[in-house]
């Protein structure tokens, strides 16, 4: 009564109470329905959640590599043990050919079927093994059990299953902990957690073993603390008054010494035919009649009892069943049920092997469980226990022990009850009082002389031996008379003397440490100064070299390493201006290169104008000027060609063609056209001259030939040659050819086919069609329109390119540049465009719209800068970042915003509603907190996915942060990173076995280190921003509520945290958590810093059990406030 069975039973049933599938799978019910659990009135432990403990057990098994299938077999075995305990037996008389005597039968077959089902056994096989035991090998006889004997067989089988399961888990854990190359003989540190001394209402064999173990450990304690201590004084030649102590060695001899020890007599009685519990009782009374540690109990305790006077008190043991318990014998009929083939579950065979391997090693058997050639009688459980205890003590004797004594504050097992008399009694019988006395009159601090000299020689380095040093320390009054004594090999001191020596050494060490610190700090400052100077020299050299990459690297070093990021240094100002200048120069170079590549005069002029505006001189600009000069010359030649074509004079055409040839323009359309017309005119002149020579010669034949050629070439015939039939016929053909050419020209012009128009125009000029012809004029107008559209498109592209570059430059744009683009777009109205040209015009319109937005943003920035309004400044700066505006005024606005945000916010006096109204402003968004690191500083040391880390600084991430969110010192920065690990572990982002302990560790750091509290809140806000996992979000809100309960944010961060809460106060899922936090903050709003600090000191970090209960949904964080009437909200998730 007052004790529970093994915890795993209650944990499994506690989980089954919540999990219907588990309950049905193993046929489980409440603890009251199982015999092995309902024999005690204690079913629960205050403050312990069985389901939570079961989850921890699952996590622990997973850590040691136990898979789900094995865990199912484990729970099936545990449940089968519970069902075995529920099997009841009724009395019957068995009469058959083999026997005629009293027996038993199963009273509740349903429980038998459940046990057989979970063990994988046939029901009739399990029933027969429980009701009968067999004898003989050739002729087997089955003897029935009486109901009491059947119950004992049932319990023995259940114990063997549990023992096998226990040994199996121990083996699995040991195998998991083994590491390759591990040497078992290496030095180890061991922790022995022994069961406490037991005095129950009914004490039997189990209590005898437990109390015997405690007697043995108490003897070891006495030996270590009393006898060895006094022997050490004698060895050192120091006289100290001896203190008596309760030596329990005679009690140990009575229990284990052979052949008269109680355990040896138990084994003897078991092996004696007809041995019984009462016979054994009479024998021990006779054997130990003179012992001071064995006595007969009072008559009220009964006759079948004996009393042992242990060091911790008198214990009365009952002998009923004592020999049977010591046998630890599982009958063969039950043992074979765990053999292969008997059950359809191989796990039973594994458990049997695990059960027998351990004991057989102690008995000298083989590890595989098979006996040797010579069969040996198995020792009893009591002798096995004695042997295992001797092995344990052998290991303890080889170690240097440190003892922790656990005392019971009361015998009623109640919390908050401390009974001094009972504590004093325990202190006396455990030897603590005696130990205190010997330490008080003796010299508890003992140091070997060599060790003492090595440790304290710093007090006087001139001494060369421990004795000289001790004498010197005595002269210095460090060694006080009567508080120390010099032994043969050791210096023995009282605590007071040891404190004097330690204080003297501390003073010397402090002086030395200050000297080391002074030198180290000086060295560090010199090194730091040299580093700062080297960075400045690096920047100066980069400025001289005008290399952007070096300048950027130098600026990053200044940002990371210099105070105030080096903003006050002229080198940084110059470097930043030069970087901006180099960026603009790169853009100018790109514009010039693009314009020279396209050879567009408008783009070339725009690029040159941009470069000249910024006073940029380079080889590219000179090349562009040369190209522009050449293009202007070509334009002049084209104009000359056009005029010559219009004049249709041989001299003008020859002069223009000669100029084009000199300029390498033979392949241009104008030159080809001019050459065609020149050739035509020269041919006409030659034919006319031939005609005049033929007329002068009077050769009719020559005249006819020339006239025919003139007609074929389309040259007008002389009036006197109109009657020449051949010439007229040739002229008719030419007219038809001219008509065909005009038609082709009209068709090409109508089709807007530029290449065809140019080709047919050459044919028209070759045919001698006059430029005044309507068809030719229409074609010429078309060609001029094409050239004009090309020029206008070039001007538009040049203007857009210039506008784009200036929008991203530090100089910014003005309205004139916007008007240029607008005029270029207007000039193109009325033209017909191809799909590609339409895309270019649409892109130009987008650039114009963006330019207008940038201009408006720039005007807004100037206005906000003049008015110094934070909200307007913040809004316009955000808009400028969205538009990627780079002009100087953006930097000026950012600097003013930073100055305004760095000022400590003053929370005005007023109601909570008024303060929350102020906190709603965008100025108080948590990512605008002035003490936060820059994104680059935050990502320092991060090489993989650096850009992702920078962009996601203020949003949820599964990765551990590389640095603290707030700019903290190096040591605190490391703690902040560990806090993030705890946060991710608690919220389930990182896998952990005990999430509650992670939350507790986080809160302990926040409570202990005030400078980390804002860091904690910022990290939680980051975790809750854009987190897609609802479970992780809920854990994050729970943690935020727990932290706000424990400590408050700083005054500087308070409005930022309020802004975050207000933002989520109307969120459907998280509003209750946010409002809870707002209520907690409101309660402490009127307190000053000192009062807040006092509150934090008085509060306790929540226990792991409480946190576990919260995250499992057993309680909510609102419960204690709801019970106090402070809050009436309930979480929706």
Image: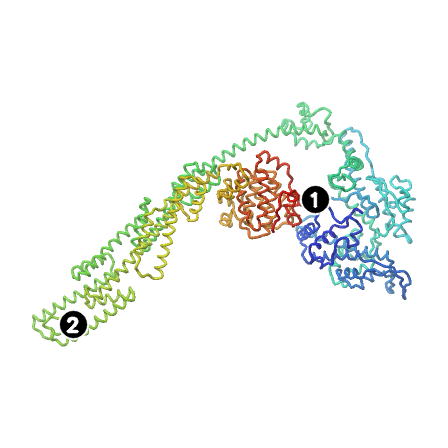
- Work out whether residue 439 or residue 1130 is closer to the camera in this orientation and state it: 1130
- Quarter holding residue 199: top right
Residue 765 bears which disc, if any?
none
Choose between 5 and 659: the one closer to the eye: 5
Res 978 seen here: no
Circles 2, 1 touching at the beta carbon (< 8 Å): no
Is 339 displayed left or right of 758 in the figure?
A: right
Give the CA separation, mark 2 to mark 1: 123 Å
| Mark 2 neighbour density, 10 Å: few (under 14) some (14–19) many (20 or more) | many
Ranked by sequence position, the earlier of labels 2 and 1 is 1
Query: Residue at coordinates 74% horizontally, 44% vertically from top-left?
Result: 193
**Crowding at mark 1 (Cα within 10 Å: few <14, some 14-19, many 20+):** few
Q: Which residue is mark 1?
A: 188
Q: Secondary structure at mark 2?
A: helix
Q: Residue at x 16, y 76 (%)?
A: 729
Residue nearest the viewer, comparing 132 with 989: 989
Estimate the x, y position of residue 250 in percent, counting from the top left: 85, 40
Residue 992 drawn at (x, y percent): 63, 49
Give the mark count. 2
Where in the figure is residue 361, as x and y percent of width and height? 78, 52
Q: Which mark is residue 711?
A: 2
Which quadrant holds residue 293?
top right
Position of residue 368 relative to residue 715, above or below, is above
Residue 127 or 401: which is nearer the viewer?
127
């Amino acid at each position: 009564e007052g004790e529970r069975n093994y915890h795993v039973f209650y944990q499994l049933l506690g989980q089954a109470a919540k999990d219907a599938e588990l309950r049905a799978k193993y046929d489980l019910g409440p603890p009251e329905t199982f015999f092995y659990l309902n024999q005690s009135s204690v079913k629960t432990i205050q403050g312990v959640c069985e389901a939570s403990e079961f989850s921890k057990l699952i996590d622990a098994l997973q850590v040691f590599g136990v898979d789900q299938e094995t865990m199912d077999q484990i729970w099936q075995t545990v449940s089968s043990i519970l069902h075995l305990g529920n099997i009841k037996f009724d009395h019957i008389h068995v009469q058959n050919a083999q026997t005629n005597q009293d027996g038993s039968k199963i009273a509740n077959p349903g429980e038998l079927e459940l046990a057989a089902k979970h063990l994988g056994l046939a029901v009739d096989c399990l029933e027969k093994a429980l009701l009968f035991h067999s004898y003989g090998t050739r002729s087997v006889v089955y003897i029935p059990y009486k109901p009491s004997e059947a119950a004992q067989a049932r319990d023995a089988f259940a114990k063997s299953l549990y023992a096998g399961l226990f040994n199996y888990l121990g083996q699995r854990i040991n195998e998991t902990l083994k590491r390759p190359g591990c040497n078992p003989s290496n030095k180890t540190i061991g922790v022995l957690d022994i069961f406490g001394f037991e005095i129950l209402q009914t004490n039997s064999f189990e209590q005898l073993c437990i109390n015997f173990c405690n007697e043995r450990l108490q003897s070891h304690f006495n030996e270590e603390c009393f006898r060895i201590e006094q022997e050490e004084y004698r060895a050192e030649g120091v006289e100290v008054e001896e203190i008596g102590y309760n030596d329990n060695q005679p009690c140990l001899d009575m229990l284990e010494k052979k052949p008269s020890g109680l355990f040896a007599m138990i084994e003897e009685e078991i092996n004696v035919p007809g041995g019984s519990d009462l016979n054994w009782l009479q024998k021990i009374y006779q054997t130990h009649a003179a012992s001071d540690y064995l006595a007969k109990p009072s008559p009220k305790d009964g006759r079948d009892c004996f009393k042992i006077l242990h060091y911790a008190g008198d214990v009365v043991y009952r002998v009923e069943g004592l020999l049977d318990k010591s046998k630890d014998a599982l009958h063969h009929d039950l043992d074979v049920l765990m053999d292969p083939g008997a059950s359809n579950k191989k796990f039973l065979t594994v458990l049997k092997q695990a059960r027998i391997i351990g004991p057989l090693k102690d008995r000298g058997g083989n590890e595989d469980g098979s006996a040797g050639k010579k069969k040996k009688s198995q020792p009893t459980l009591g002798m096995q226990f004695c042997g295992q205890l001797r092995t344990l003590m052998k290991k303890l004797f080889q170690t240097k022990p440190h003892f922790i004594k656990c005392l019971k504050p009361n015998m009623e097992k109640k919390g908050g009850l401390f009974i001094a008399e009972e504590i004093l009694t325990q202190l006396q019988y455990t030897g603590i009082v005696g130990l205190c006395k010997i330490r008080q009159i003796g010299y508890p601090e003992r140091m070997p002389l060599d060790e003492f000299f090595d440790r304290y020689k710093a007090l006087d380095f001139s001494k060369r031996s421990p004795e000289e040093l001790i004498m010197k320390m005595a002269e210095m009054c460090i060694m006080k008379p009567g508080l120390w004594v010099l032994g043969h090999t050791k210096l023995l001191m009282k605590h007071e003397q040891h404190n004097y020596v330690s204080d003297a050494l501390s003073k010397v060490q402090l002086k030395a440490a200050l000297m080391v610190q002074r030198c180290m700090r000086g060295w560090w400052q010199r090194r730091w100064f040299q580093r700062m100077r080297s960075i400045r020299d690096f920047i100066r050299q980069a400025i001289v070299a005008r290399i952007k990459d070096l300048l950027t690297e130098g600026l990053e070093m200044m940002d990371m390493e210099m105070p105030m990021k080096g903003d006050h240094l002229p080198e940084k100002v110059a470097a930043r201006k030069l970087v901006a200048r180099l960026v603009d120069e790169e853009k100018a170079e790109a514009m010039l290169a693009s314009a020279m590549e396209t050879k567009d005069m408008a783009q070339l002029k725009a690029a040159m104008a941009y470069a000249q505006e910024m006073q940029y001189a380079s080889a590219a600009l000179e090349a562009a000027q040369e190209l522009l000069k050449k293009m202007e010359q070509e334009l002049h030649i084209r104009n000359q060609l056009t005029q010559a074509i219009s004049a249709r004079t041989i001299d003008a055409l020859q002069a223009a063609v000669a100029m084009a040839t000199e300029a390498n323009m033979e392949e241009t359309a104008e030159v080809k056209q001019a050459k065609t017309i020149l050739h035509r005119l020269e041919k006409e002149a030659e034919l006319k001259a031939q005609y005049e020579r033929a007329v002068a010669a009077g050769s009719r034949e020559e005249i006819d030939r020339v006239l025919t050629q003139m007609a074929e070439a389309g040259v007008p015939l002389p009036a006197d040659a109109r009657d020449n039939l051949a010439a007229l016929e040739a002229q008719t053909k030419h007219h038809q050819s001219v008509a065909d050419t005009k038609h082709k020209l009209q068709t090409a012009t109508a089709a807007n086919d530029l290449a065809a128009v140019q080709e047919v125009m050459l044919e028209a000029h070759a045919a001698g069609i006059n430029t005044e012809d309507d068809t030719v004029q229409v074609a010429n107008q078309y060609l001029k329109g094409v050239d004009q559209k090309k020029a206008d498109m070039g001007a538009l592209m040049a203007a857009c390119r210039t506008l784009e570059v200036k929008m991203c430059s530090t100089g910014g744009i003005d309205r004139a540049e916007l008007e240029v683009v607008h005029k270029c777009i207007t000039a193109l109205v009325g033209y017909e465009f191809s799909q590609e040209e339409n895309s270019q015009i649409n892109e130009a319109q987008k650039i114009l719209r963006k330019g207008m937005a940038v201009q408006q943003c720039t005007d807004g920035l100037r206005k906000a800068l003049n008015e110094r309004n934070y909200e307007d400044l913040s809004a316009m700066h955000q808009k400028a970042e969205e538009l990627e505006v780079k002009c100087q005024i953006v930097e000026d606005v950012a600097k003013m915003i930073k100055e305004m945000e760095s000022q400590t916010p003053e929370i005005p006096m007023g109601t909570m509603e008024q303060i929350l109204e102020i906190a709603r402003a965008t100025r108080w968004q948590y990512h605008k907190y002035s003490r936060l690191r820059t994104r680059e500083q935050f990502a320092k040391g991060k090489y993989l996915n650096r850009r992702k880390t920078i962009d996601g600084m203020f949003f949820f991430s599964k990765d551990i942060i590389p640095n603290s969110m707030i700019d903290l010192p190096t040591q605190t920065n490391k703690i902040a990173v560990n806090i993030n690990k705890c946060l991710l572990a608690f919220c389930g982002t990182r896998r952990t076995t005990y999430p509650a302990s992670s939350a507790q560790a986080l809160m302990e750091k926040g409570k202990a280190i005030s400078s980390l509290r804002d860091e904690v809140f910022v990290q939680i806000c980051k975790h809750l921003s854009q987190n897609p996992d609802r479970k992780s979000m809920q854990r994050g809100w729970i943690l935020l509520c727990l932290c706000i309960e424990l400590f408050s944010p700083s005054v500087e961060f308070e409005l930022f945290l309020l802004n975050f809460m207000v933002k989520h106060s109307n969120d459907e899922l998280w509003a209750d958590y946010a409002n809870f936090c707002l209520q907690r903050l409101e309660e402490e709003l009127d307190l000053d810093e000192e009062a807040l600090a006092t509150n934090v000191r008085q509060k306790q970090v929540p226990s792991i059990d409480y946190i576990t209960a919260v995250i499992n949904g057993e309680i909510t964080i609102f419960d204690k406030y709801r019970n106090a009437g402070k809050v009436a909200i309930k979480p929706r998730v």
